[in-house]
Image (spheres, rainbow, N blue to C red):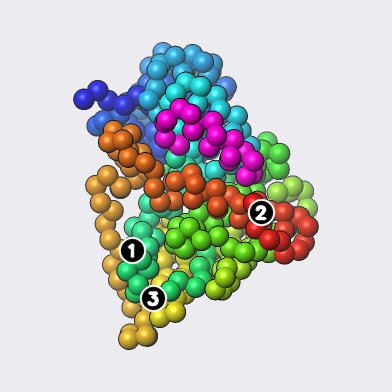
């Protein structure tokens, strides 16, 4: 069977290098082109994956002339809708690296653009591939903690400029130099910790809650002089049966993939019959139940073949004609985007709001 042809579109998000590595290492796929208006942004990936000059493009249409099957989009959040609409005209499957969009209007534009093509739209949330979080979902669905009533989420990192692809670290001095220039710190580009990380909590939270949406949302964000976007947000969602809390933070003491900071990054689930704590990148979850109230560890399930990472999963869906499910499903992500939009508006208006339609 011919290998699936993949292009990388825009290197605004540092995850492009990680995703291209997964394509490069997949036996059923090949990188046929990369595009960004800045050739310098593509230099590292071009070197790492030995891409010849005729696969490196600063012209979008020249890149799409390579006839890709799948486009990986890593643009600034505010540009997701426009790029998705452009990609849809070429009849390709589209893989969007989180967040989904700058707002629900843009998210719906993306879904509408892809609908007539018959191609897949997937929104990738890297935490969906953390074994402990997947194991927590299995245990919740099996009823280990009874009815799920609360989802508590705390997550973030030292800041989006502290690391490059493959988690290569950047010095604090270089981070401060880049801040005034980076889209991550520009409101118009969709920057800020709320848009960067609340989508994780809202999307996986909606997945854990089997698609249920909250009734109302309350959010507050920090305000740092000289920084136009938030670096810390706290969102409370009121569901029919309880309150859930989702907190985002740029400025954790350490990056959770290196050393878990305090507070620890990850999820805590409270059910009618027990609790589960699932830390980011942990080899286990910690469980309490009525029958065994002392916290105890349950080893995280290894991810099965075909679902070990986002690229393997989406390429499998394309090859076998399967729909996108779970946290990558755009319909589920639309509910999460409504939560994010309501939170952003709540913070701006400094009041509790009903979930937007």
Q: Is residue 208 above or below residue 290?
A: above
Q: Are marks 3 and 2 in contact (CB under 8 Å)?
A: no
Disc nearer the start of the sequence (2/1): 1
Q: Which mark is residue 20?
A: none
Residue 204 at what x, y percent from top left?
47, 57
Q: Are marks 2 and 1 in contact (CB under 8 Å)?
A: no
- Which residue is tagged 3? 145
Residue 264 at what x, y percent from top left?
49, 66
At horizontal 45% and vertical 57% (from top left) the residue drawn is 207
At horizontal 61% and vertical 52% (from top left) the residue drawn is 338
Quarter of the image where the N terminus is located: top left
**Inter-mark Cα distance, 1 to 3:** 11 Å
At horizontal 36% and vertical 66% (from top left) the residue drawn is 141
Q: Which mark is residue 356?
A: 2
Is 224 within the magenta? no
146 and 292: which is toward the camera: 146
Residue 96 at what x, y percent from top left?
49, 37
Which region shows up in magenta? Answer: 102-121
Q: Residues within 10 Å of mark 2 (few under 14, many from 20)?
A: some
Residue 73 at what x, y percent from top left?
49, 33
Is 110 within the magenta? yes
What kind of element bears circle 1?
Answer: helix
Q: Residues within 10 Å of mark 1 (few under 14, many from 20)?
A: some
Q: Residues within 10 Å of mark 3 (few under 14, many from 20)?
A: many
Marks 3 and 2: which is nearer the front? Answer: 2
- Which residue is tagged 1? 138
At horizontal 48% and vertical 58% (from top left) the residue drawn is 211
What kind of element bears circle 2?
Answer: loop
254 and 149: which is toward the camera: 149
């Amino acid at each position: 069977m011919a290998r699936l042809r993949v292009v990388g579109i825009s290197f605004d998000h540092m995850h492009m290098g990680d995703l291209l590595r997964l394509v490069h290492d997949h036996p059923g796929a090949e990188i046929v082109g990369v595009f960004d208006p800045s050739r310098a942004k593509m230099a590292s990936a071009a070197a790492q994956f030995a891409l010849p000059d005729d696969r490196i493009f600063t012209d979008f249409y020249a890149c799409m002339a390579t006839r890709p099957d799948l486009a990986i989009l890593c643009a600034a959040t505010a540009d997701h809708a426009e790029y998705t609409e452009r990609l849809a005209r070429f009849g390709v499957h589209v893989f969007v690296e989180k967040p989904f969009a700058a707002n629900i209007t843009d998210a719906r534009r993306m879904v509408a653009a892809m609908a007539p093509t018959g191609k897949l739209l997937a929104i990738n949330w890297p935490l969906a591939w953390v074994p402990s979080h997947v194991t927590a979902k299995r245990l919740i669905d099996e009823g280990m903690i009874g009815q799920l009533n609360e989802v508590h989420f705390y997550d973030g990192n030292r800041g989006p400029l502290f690391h490059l692809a493959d988690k290569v670290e950047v010095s604090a001095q270089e981070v401060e130099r880049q801040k005034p220039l980076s889209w991550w710190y520009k409101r118009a580009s969709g920057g800020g910790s709320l848009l960067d990380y609340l989508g994780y909590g809202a999307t996986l939270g909606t997945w854990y809650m089997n698609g249920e949406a909250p009734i109302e949302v309350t959010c507050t964000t920090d305000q740092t002089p000289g920084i136009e976007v938030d670096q810390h947000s706290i969102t409370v969602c009121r569901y029919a049966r309880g309150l859930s809390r989702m907190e985002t933070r740029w400025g954790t003491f350490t990056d959770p993939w290196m050393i878990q900071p305090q507070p620890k990054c990850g999820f805590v689930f409270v059910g009618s019959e027990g609790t589960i704590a699932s830390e980011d990148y942990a080899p286990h979850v910690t469980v309490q139940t009525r029958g065994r109230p002392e916290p105890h560890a349950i080893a995280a399930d290894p991810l099965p073949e075909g679902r070990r990472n986002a690229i393997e999963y989406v390429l499998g869906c394309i090859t076998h004609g399967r729909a996108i499910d779970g946290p990558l499903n755009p319909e589920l992500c639309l509910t999460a985007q409504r939560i994010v939009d309501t939170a952003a508006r709540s913070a701006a208006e400094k009041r509790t709001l009903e979930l937007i339609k």
